[in-house]
């Protein structure tokens, strides 16, 4: 058994038992590791400690319950493994910046630490050969955009830090506000939901921030205060998958992390804009394509980049 497979067993066990008292000794038994190596391996592969991971997964589950149900806050707290209302509320506010009661009254977009599929960092597929990750099918291939595609939409800014990707960050989701802005400004406009785009790029964002554009394919008409963004003609690495709307953010995080791993293993590096193309289908299914502009990874003397 590979080390990541042993660690995945403990991750799966945590997910199935979030409401229970989770002890390191039990997780070590599940992974067939000593307590020392269980903790050390977990931190190395998941990038946070076991205790921190359990806390963040409990909060992620709580956010779903608070949004989807009318249960009292204290009932949600106990259901996800907290032993008091005070401890739950304090922890929730520390991580997300608002109290659980306030979130339940007016749910907003949150960034959660998702359950990781560690296989996505170890299995390299060939182009066009799908990879299945807990119900979502990821497929990577090269595509050439034969002509520039013009989109009409809105631009906003969000805080940007290198390192943690979608599904590894926590807090209020600033990109969610930009999508809401787009939908509000196009509420009375014909909307081509068959081709929407969200794209992160440097733009004119202030230091410490990145620009993010949300738009729809342009038909020549423009709505008030419309901003245009063009998907250049060139070759891209495209990671595609289908997902239900409720799982979109989780599966997007998986696709982003796997694409980064796949590029590195194949000797490529992503350039400085990251388009996400969306096509809405029936029954709340969304087809998503990440179009990653890429170039050859350059190795310097001594093997460093």
Image (tube, grey):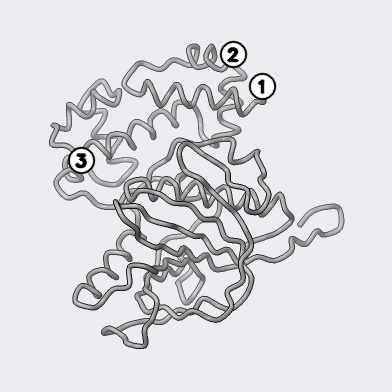
Q: Nearer the viewer, residue 39 or 266?
A: 266
Q: Which mark is residue 1?
A: 1
In this picture, is 218 found above or below 163?
Answer: below
Q: Secondary structure at mark 3?
A: helix
Identify the residue under disc 3: 68
Is 195 on the left-hand or right-hand side of 37?
Answer: left
Q: Which mark is residue 32?
A: 2
In this picture, is 170 found above or below 140?
Answer: above
Which quadrant does the C terminus fall into?
bottom right
Crowding at label 1, few (<14), some or many (≥20) Cα neighbours within 10 Å? few
Q: Residue furthest bottom?
A: 220
> Which badge, 1 or 2, is on the more N-terminal residue?
1
Q: Nearer the viewer, residue 127 or 2?
A: 127
Is 125 on the left-hand or right-hand side of 205?
Answer: right
Give the residue at x 58% y 20%. Answer: 38
- Residue 295, image x and y in percent? 70, 66
């Amino acid at each position: 058994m590979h080390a990541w497979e042993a660690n995945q067993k403990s991750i799966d066990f945590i997910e199935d038992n979030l409401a229970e008292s989770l002890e390191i000794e039990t997780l070590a038994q599940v992974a067939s590791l000593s307590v020392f190596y269980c903790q050390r391996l977990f931190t190395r592969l998941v990038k946070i400690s076991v205790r921190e991971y359990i806390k963040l997964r409990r909060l992620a589950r709580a956010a779903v319950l608070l949004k989807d149900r009318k249960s009292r806050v204290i009932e949600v707290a106990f259901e996800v493994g907290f032993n008091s209302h005070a401890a739950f509320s304090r922890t929730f506010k520390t991580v997300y910046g608002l109290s659980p009661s306030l979130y339940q009254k007016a749910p907003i977009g949150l960034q959660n630490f998702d359950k990781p599929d560690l296989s996505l960092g170890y299995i390299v597929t060939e182009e066009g050969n799908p990879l299945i990750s807990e119900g979502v099918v990821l497929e990577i291939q090269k595509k050439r955009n034969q002509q520039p595609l013009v989109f009409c939409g809105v631009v906003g800014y969000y805080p940007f830090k290198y390192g943690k990707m979608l599904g590894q960050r926590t807090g209020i989701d600033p990109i969610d506000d930009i999508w809401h802005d787009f939908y509000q400004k196009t509420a009375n406009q014909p909307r081509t939901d068959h081709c929407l785009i969200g794209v992160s790029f440097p733009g004119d964002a202030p230091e410490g921030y990145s620009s993010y554009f949300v738009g729809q394919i342009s038909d020549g008409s423009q709505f008030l205060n419309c901003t245009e963004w063009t998907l250049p003609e060139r070759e891209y690495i495209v990671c595609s998958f289908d997902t239900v709307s409720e799982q979109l953010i989780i599966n997007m995080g998986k696709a982003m992390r796997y694409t980064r791993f796949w590029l590195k293993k194949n000797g490529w590096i992503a350039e400085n804009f990251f388009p996400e193309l969306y096509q809405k289908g029936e029954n709340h299914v969304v087809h998503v394509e990440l179009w990653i502009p890429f170039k050859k990874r350059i190795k310097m003397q001594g093997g460093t980049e």
